[in-house]
Amino acid sequence: MVIDSELLKPQTAATILRVKVGTLAAWRSKGIGAEFVRLNRSIRYPCSSLAAFVRSGAAPAARLETGA
């Protein structure tokens, strides 16, 4: 599990990645996408995991949805 000093809400993470919040939810259920932390019923994305996801070349995520 990644612990980061700044944890972002899914809405903020979606804006950064330029995808819909529903896309993040779908990725979580499939076990793909940026690493996240579950705090009780809340989902949070550490800034470092979003940065790593972008560096991995998998973002912007819309590319994965269209299959392009």
Image: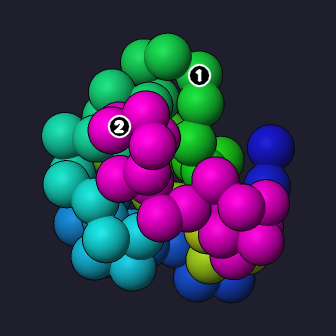
Q: Secondary structure at mark 1?
A: loop
Quadrant holding the C terminus: top left
Q: Label 2: which residue?
A: 65
Instruction: Choose the circle earlier in sequence order: 2 or 1.
Output: 1
Question: Viewer-proximal residue, 20 or 10?
Answer: 20
Magenta-drawn segment: 51-68
Q: Position of residue 57 (x, y in %)?
A: 71, 61
**Relative horizontal placement of residue 11, taking residue 9 as reference (left or right):** left
Q: Mark number for residue 31?
A: 1
> How far separated are the C-alphas under marks 2 and 1?
15 Å
Residue type, mark 2 in image: Glu
Q: Position of residue 20 (x, y in %)?
A: 19, 54
Residue 67 lies within the magenta run: yes
In the depicted structure, whether residue 22 falls above or below residue 8: above
Question: Viewer-proximal residue, 25 or 5?
Answer: 25
Residue type, mark 1 in image: Gly
Q: Secondary structure at mark 2?
A: helix
Number of numbered discs on residues: 2
